[in-house]
Image (cartoon, rainbow, N blue to C red):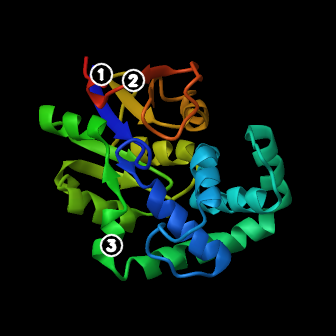
Amino acid sequence: MNKVYCFDFDGVLCNSIYECFIVAYNAYYNKNYNNNKDINKDIQNFFYKFRYLAKPAKEFFIIFYAFEKNFYQINREIFDDLKNSLENEIKYFDTKFYKAREKLKEDIKNWLKLHIKYDQFENFLEKYSIKFNIVTNKDKDSVIKIAKHHGYLNRIDSIYSKEISNDKNILFDILIKEKKLDLLKTEIVYVDDQVDNLENVQKNIKCLYLADWGYNIKSNNKFKRIYSLNEIII
């Protein structure tokens, strides 16, 4: 059976948590920081701890809101309740976030330094020459710039990103249609670091893996957990 390899970006190929924090902080507080060294450590730690709950970038608003309202812990239920009650604020924050990202990108060298290629991905690139697709909630321009900087842009077949949809089911539907895949003859292999994303696509995508190194809950065992991308090659 033919295989088509698809990867989430943030949390699987690229650790962008520091960039995401700085951009979200600037957007939320109307600041203009280009690094995190002078930002309050408590809010940084809170963001890093609960980053896994947010999927599209606009949901970072909820983490900052929860911190300001003195939530000491948030889980999926609390997060989703806040998301439902803060719909208008989150929508407004989405625009501010991408404006703040473009502002940070003005110093492109500094911006690129905030993105780290995971060793688990680096080892895969070195061992295999396989091309792959990106299925992500990140913006396409950022993916292209980061991939080019790290030297693997030529390994990417196609990018399906937030400009199309934040729903990965829709992204996969388009991927299957554009590539004219016969799912009786082709197996889509997908790696994500968030269980929610895997749950969302499992009806149509059967070969699913949870990246251990991303922004996830380590105790979750709903999907096969891998410790290196090399494990998906059978």
Could you tell me how far apart the alpha carbons at marks 1 and 2 are, in whole angstroms? 7 Å
Residue type at tag 2: Ile
The N terminus lies in which quarter of the figure? top left
Among numbered discs 1 and 2, the one appearing first in the sequence:
2
Task: Where is residue 86? Give x, y as percent.
Answer: 81, 62
Q: Is residue 5 depicted above or below 141 in this figure?
A: above
Q: Quadrant of residue 61?
A: bottom right
Task: Where is residue 4? Give x, y as percent.
Answer: 31, 33
Q: Which mark is residue 226?
A: 2
Front label number (2 vs 3): 3
Q: Are marks 1 and 2 in contact (CB under 8 Å)?
A: yes
**Which residue is identified by label 1?**
231
Q: Is residue 138 something that shows in the picture?
A: no
Q: Are marks 3 and 1 in contact (CB under 8 Å)?
A: no
Residue drawn at point x = 49 percent, y = 48 percent: 171
Task: Where is residue 60? Give x, y as percent.
Answer: 64, 59
Q: Is residue 165 something that shows in the picture?
A: yes
For the image, the number of numbered tags is 3
Q: Quadrant of residue 199?
A: top right
SS type, badge 2: strand
**Which residue is identified by label 3?**
110
Among numbered discs 3 and 1, the one appearing first in the sequence:
3
Could you tell me how far apart the alpha carbons at marks 2 and 3 are, in whole angstroms? 31 Å
Q: Is residue 121 depicted above or below 112 in this figure?
A: above
